[in-house]
Image (spheres, rainbow, N blue to C red):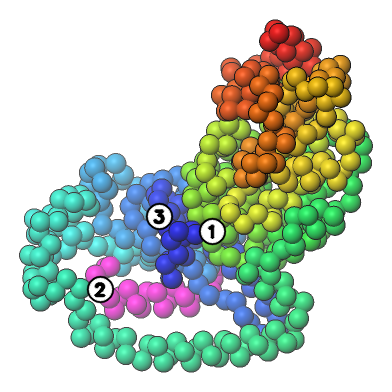
């Protein structure tokens, strides 16, 4: 699996969950189309390759491949070729036990160009691939390669038993049946060797020709060349420098999703290869890049557009974003309501596992403060559910300045992806601290948002929209310290000395508050004020009050600790 522990040359991505590879390939193809539009010029074409995906029956039963297929056809990604190994087998049963649709008609209905061939006829396979590559008709290509699983292994040939370990005892006999010499585990036929004679020379000639074109393009387009070099090598300014480049956000109370809209314009300016998209919620999540153009074909779209419209396809959005990251030419964020992240949770896991630092998710409407939409749209368990993923930073900023640092961190971190958790409702900023101090503190995951004025006897931890409640209560408690903790994961990576300076072990009286489930906070606090139930439909301020997210309730809970 490609990450810092496994980096086998030639393996660009593996997927684990079925269907992800098809959708990843759509991301590769979209990213390649974008690269062609951004970097190719009339005089020099440096991008223009095809993207291949190999998939099986199970991949097309998973819904994510259907979502991605619809997107690919709609945006006319004709550089994509999917090869379907149609052996009519799944793990438990033959495929006919669970599927009966005509998959060629299904893909044709999406808008793909389809082919139906004998997957064992290598001449037919080669001819079909050539035809698919030559067909620049605005349609992605779907090649159904009809095959027999376990071919030559007569005991299990053509059955689901060949899918797993059942055929292992018959391997040697099967090799003999198809004419391979006995006793050679890694036999390569002379015909295969002959086929590859001259391939290296041919490829070297094509490579050298491309290098000449690239050198000429680079000389003619120095600014684009720098942008591409930065993208390929993941060169961005440091988080500290980027924060310094972004103006202060002001002292007005505002929702962090609104702050995020301001910050994303700055991120796009400072990181030219940054793009963003949404699952039909740009108007609510506010991650639209002004003057960035819209990606795709038709209407007002072009392949150079920085704003992707994924439609109501969250799962495909997550997988396509991972494909963009694997392709390696753009940083990408995608947005939806926080509660809908569970629609693409498998892709979050893969992004964390593969350490895809080019990916971030903008997840808004972050609590029961959503209000009238009711419990179906009010996340309570979701933030904690994201925090348990290894390699994933979950940032829930408390005001506009913390939002700046959170978004900066998402495009400068190297170890993995970032989930940005933004509020629907306005949040009062902590103007007692400078913008610089709040940004610097956020980049460390947690910081002292209010110092105690007498001997320390209480620490109140909070995050997001609950930080103002903590500050209000602590204002009347001279011995109370408030710690804003926008990102647990980032805080845990700080030095022991820094962590001790923020949360001194000498002070064991600690309370945490967050509008969500309480479990994870007990790592830091002995008492947690949270919401261990689903919400209800009412205006956001009422749901917050009724479920205890107020300074008054926090104060009462602290007093009960005495």
Marks 2, 3: nearer the viewer: 2
Q: Secondary structure at mark 1?
A: helix
- In the rendered image, is residue 486 in sight? no
Kindly identify the residue that appears in the image at 88 percent across and 37 percent down. Answer: 433
Observer-nearest of 258 and 351: 351
Residue 136 included in the magenta stretch of the image: yes
**Crowdedness near tag 1: few (<14), some (14–19) or many (≥20) residues, C-alpha within 10 Å:** many
Q: For the residues marked 2 and 1, what is the alpha-carbon distance in whole angstroms?
A: 30 Å
In the displayed structure, 141 sits above or below 193; it is: above
Residue at the spot of label 1: 323
| Label at residue 24 | none
Q: Position of residue 229 (x, y in %)?
A: 67, 74
Q: Which residue is mark 2?
A: 121
Q: Earlier in the sequence, mark 2 or mark 3?
A: 3
Residue drawn 62% across and 45% down?
A: 493
Horizontal relation, residue 10 to residue 32: left or right: left
Q: Quadrant of residue 366?
A: top right
Q: Is residue 167 left or right of residue 478?
A: left
Which dot, 1 or 3, sits closer to the camera?
Answer: 1
Nearest to N terminus: mark 1 or mark 3: 3
Contact flag, marks 2 and 1 (Cβ < 8 Å): no
Tell me whether the residue at label 1 lies in contact with that at label 3, contact meaning CB atoms closer than 8 angstroms.
Answer: no
In the image, which residues are magenta? 118-139
- Quarter assignment of residue 509: top right
Answer whether residue 409 is magenta in the image: no
At horizontal 43% and vertical 90% (from top left) the residue drawn is 202
Name the residue nearer the viewer: 321 or 392: 392
Of marks 2 and 1, the one in the foreground:
1
- What residue is disc 3 on? 105
Dot 2: what SS? loop
Point 41% across, 48% down: residue: 17
Going from N to C along the chain, the mark reached first, 2 or 1, is 2
């Amino acid at each position: 699996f490609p990450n810092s522990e496994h980096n086998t040359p030639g393996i660009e991505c593996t997927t684990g969950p079925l269907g992800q590879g098809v959708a990843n390939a759509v991301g590769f193809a979209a990213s390649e189309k974008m690269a062609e539009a951004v970097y190719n010029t009339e005089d020099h074409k440096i991008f223009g390759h095809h993207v291949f995906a190999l998939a099986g029956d199970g991949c097309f039963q998973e819904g994510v491949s259907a979502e991605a297929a619809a997107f690919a056809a709609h945006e006319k990604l004709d550089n994509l070729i999917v090869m379907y190994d149609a052996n009519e087998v799944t793990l438990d049963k033959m495929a006919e036990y669970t599927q009966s649709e005509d998959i060629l008609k299904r893909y044709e209905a999406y808008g793909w160009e389809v082919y139906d061939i004998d997957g064992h006829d290598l001449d037919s396979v080669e001819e079909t691939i050539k035809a698919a590559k030559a067909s620049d008709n605005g349609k992605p290509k779907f090649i159904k390669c009809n095959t027999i699983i376990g071919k030559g292994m007569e005991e299990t040939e053509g059955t689901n038993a060949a899918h797993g370990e059942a055929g292992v005892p018959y391997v040697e006999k099967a090799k003999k049946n198809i004419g391979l010499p006995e006793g050679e585990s890694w036999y390569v036929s002379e015909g295969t060797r002959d086929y590859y004679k001259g391939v290296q020379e041919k490829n070297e000639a094509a490579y050298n020709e491309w290098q000449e074109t690239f050198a000429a393009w680079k000389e003619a387009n120095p600014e684009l060349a720098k942008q591409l070099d930065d993208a390929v090598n993941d060169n961005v300014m440091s988080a500290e420098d980027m924060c310094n480049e972004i103006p202060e956000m002001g002292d007005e109370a505002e929702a962090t999703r609104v702050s995020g809209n301001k910050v994303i314009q700055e991120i796009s300016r400072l990181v030219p290869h940054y793009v963003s998209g949404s699952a039909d919620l740009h108007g609510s999540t506010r991650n639209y890049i002004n003057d960035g153009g819209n990606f795709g074909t038709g209407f007002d779209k072009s392949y150079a557009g920085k704003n992707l419209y994924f439609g109501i396809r969250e799962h495909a959005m997550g997988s396509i974003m991972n494909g963009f990251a694997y392709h390696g030419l753009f940083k990408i964020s995608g947005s939806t309501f926080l509660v809908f992240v569970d629609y693409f949770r498998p892709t979050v896991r893969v992004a964390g596992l593969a350490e895809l630092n080019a990916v971030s998710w903008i997840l808004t409407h972050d609590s029961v403060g959503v209000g009238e939409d009711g419990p179906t749209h009010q996340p309570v368990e979701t933030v904690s559910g994201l925090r348990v993923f290894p390699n994933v930073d979950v940032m829930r900023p408390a005001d506009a300045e913390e939002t700046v640092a959170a978004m900066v961190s998402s495009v400068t971190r190297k170890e993995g992806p970032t989930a940005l958790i933004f509020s629907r409702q306005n949040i009062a900023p902590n103007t007692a601290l400078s913008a610089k101090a709040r940004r610097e503190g956020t980049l460390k995951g947690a910081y002292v948002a209010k110092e105690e004025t007498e001997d320390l006897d209480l620490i109140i931890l909070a995050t997001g929209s609950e930080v103002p409640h903590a500050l209000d209560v602590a204002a009347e408690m001279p011995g109370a310290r408030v710690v804003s903790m926008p990102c647990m994961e980032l805080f845990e990576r700080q030095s022991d000395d820094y962590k001790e300076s923020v949360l001194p072990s000498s002070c064991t009286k600690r309370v945490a508050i967050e509008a969500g489930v309480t479990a994870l906070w007990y790592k830091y606090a002995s008492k947690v004020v949270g919401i261990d139930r689903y919400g209800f439909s009412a205006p956001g301020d009422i749901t917050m009050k009724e479920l205890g997210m107020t300074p008054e309730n926090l104060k009462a809970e602290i007093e009960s600790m005495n």
